[in-house]
Amino acid sequence: EAAVTQSPRSKVAVTGGKVTLSCHQTNNHDYMYWYRQDTGHGLRLIHYSYVADSTEKGDIPDGYKASRPSQENFSLILELASLSQTAVYFCASSGTTISNERLFFGHGTKLSVL
Amino acid sequence: GDKVKQSPSALSLQEGTNSALRCNFSIAATTVQWFLQNPRGSLINLFYLVPGTKENGRLKSAFDSKESYSTLHIRDAQLEDSGTYFCAAESSNTNKVVFGTGTRLQVLP
């Protein structure tokens, strides 16, 4: 079974502070993604990457940066956390092309910005 | 409007009964995935579909790209089927996967 591990599982941050969410996959997948889920809603794509050292903007990238230092690792960075960024964040990976592989998700990181 | 619309938004079932969930797409979808988000919050990939049907135990899913919809049928519902079901479609225009807002299912004893 594919494995995607996120850390931390939960975090409380202060407004204006910096937050880094980490994701590690052992699937040998090329694609990695960061989604956010707000209460009662589906998932929205923030950033994604299809190769190390390169990231792409998703549908809601404002206020977020991403880093893909290796095939296995993908980080989401909030330089100046805001109240509106309180949400659950999911990392996912998929295979060699977006159109041919299913998404495998991590367990999520619950972020509360106070 | 919603690019991926799920119905119903919420549903309660008696254990042992059957039900069908539906996704309608306003985008040109090439593939569809169905996920279950369990009460602990984990997202489990149930199906990955190109146009056609797949079956796995008590679950069966169909995807009709021409009519722009997908269905998930649950047979003999069990308590552990409770959770929120999401469909997600890959857009042929953007190659991005777009999620619906989910169907919250509660199976009652």
Image: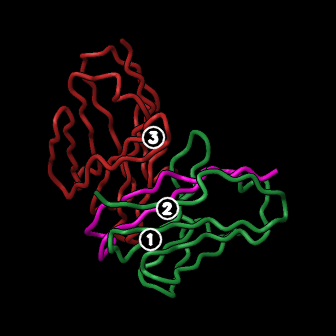
Chain colours: A green, B red
Q: Do the dots labelled 2 and 3 sit on one chain? A: no
Where is residue A4 drawn, in percent x and y? 42, 61
Quarter of the rendering occupied by the N terminus of chain A: bottom left
Residue B31, how many percent across, how many down?
A: 27, 60
Residue with the mark numbered 1: A32
- Please give the name of the residue rendered at 24% of the width and 16% of the height, measured from the top-left corner: B16
Residue B107 to residue A104: above or below: above
Query: In the rendered structure, which amino acid carries the disc numbered 1?
Result: Met
Closer to us: B61 or A90: A90
| Three-letter residue code for mark 3 | Gly
Residue under mark 1: which chain is it in?
Answer: A
Residue tagged 3? B102
In the drawing, what numbered circle is on residue A91?
2
Q: Residue A61's image quarter?
A: bottom right
Label 2 marks which chain's residue?
A: A
Q: Are marks 2 and 1 in contact (CB under 8 Å)?
A: yes
Position of residue B70 measured from the top left corner of the image (x, y, whole percent): 27, 45
Q: Which residues are magenta?
A: A86-114
| Residue that appears at 18% across and 55% down | B51
Q: In the rendering, at what x and y percent does residue A94 appear?
A: 35, 67
Give how far apart the Cα atoms at labels 2 and 1 are: 7 Å
Q: Is residue A46 magenta-colored?
A: no
- Considering the numbered disc 3 on the image, is that residue within a helix, a strand or a loop? loop
Question: Dot 3, crowdedness within 10 Å: few (<14), some or many (≥20)?
Answer: many
- Decide: marks 3, 1 in contact (CB < 8 A)? no
Above or below: residue A96 compared with residue B72: below
Numbered disc 1: secondary structure: strand
Q: Count the labels in the image.
A: 3
At 59% from the left edge and 52% from the top edge, which residue is drawn?
A9
Q: On the rendered structure, is A66 left or right of A24?
A: right
